[in-house]
Amino acid sequence: MTALADRPLSGLTLRPLPDPEGSSIATGPYPASTGSLESKRHLTIDVGGAERWQRPALVQYVEAELNALLELSDGWDGRRAHAVTIPAIQATVHVLAVVTNETSAPPQLFPLPDGGIQVEWHVGGNSIEIEIDAEGEPHVLAQTSDGETIVEGVIALEQADARLLEARNFLQTLSARLAHVLTPA
């Protein structure tokens, strides 16, 4: 797992979350803004046929973040980093559809040099980090503020993986704590 403890946290707000049932993505090219014939990669997250204005704010946020990551080309780090892969994007959408619910805090998303994606939540010293490699294989590490490991290991996407469900439960706990802090008394 990549530790990014030295980075400042972005402002976290509570946003409605997608229904994990029926979430999917569609990818396709769209013309580059330069008017050339080059194409950019672009995705749309489908949440059961909802119109764009009806889609939950978190879905729109994740879609925008993933599209920003898709714009990165090889060498985005000034060195040898690879562009984010479609299998990493697909696994990220799948993991988020399972882990999040209507009360979950939104994640932070970061590109990884191998073409994968890092998905993170940090609340009061507690953290959940899900690293999805370029092939789309997710690995989870969830720890409490005192260093206790809640869950760690490879996640199997083909089934209801116990690690993923433990991460979901821990995220719900962290989100509830965050909501309590952000809600005026």
Image (cartoon, rainbow, N blue to C red):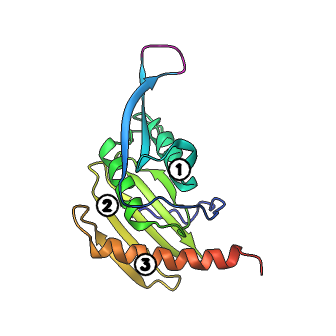
Kindly report which numbered mark, 3 or 2, lies closer to the viewer in this rendering: 3
Using the image, determine if residue 123 lies above or below residue 94: below
Element type where label 2 sits in the image: strand
Q: CA distance from mark 2 to mark 1?
A: 26 Å
Classify residue 178 by image quadrant. Answer: bottom right
Where does the image place residue 9, in percent across and percent down from the top left?
62, 62
Q: Which residue lies under the disc numbered 3?
A: 169
Q: Which residues are magenta?
A: 33-37
Q: Which residue lies under the disc numbered 1?
A: 55
- Marking on residue 138: 2
Decide whether residue 49 is among the magenta residues.
no
Using the image, determine if residue 11 lies above or below residue 76: below
Kindly report which numbered mark, 1 or 3, lies closer to the viewer in this rendering: 1
Where does the image place residue 64, in percent across and percent down from the top left?
53, 44
Name the dominant secondary structure of the magenta segment.
Answer: loop
Q: Earlier in the sequence, mark 2 or mark 1?
A: 1
Q: Earlier in the sequence, mark 1 or mark 3?
A: 1
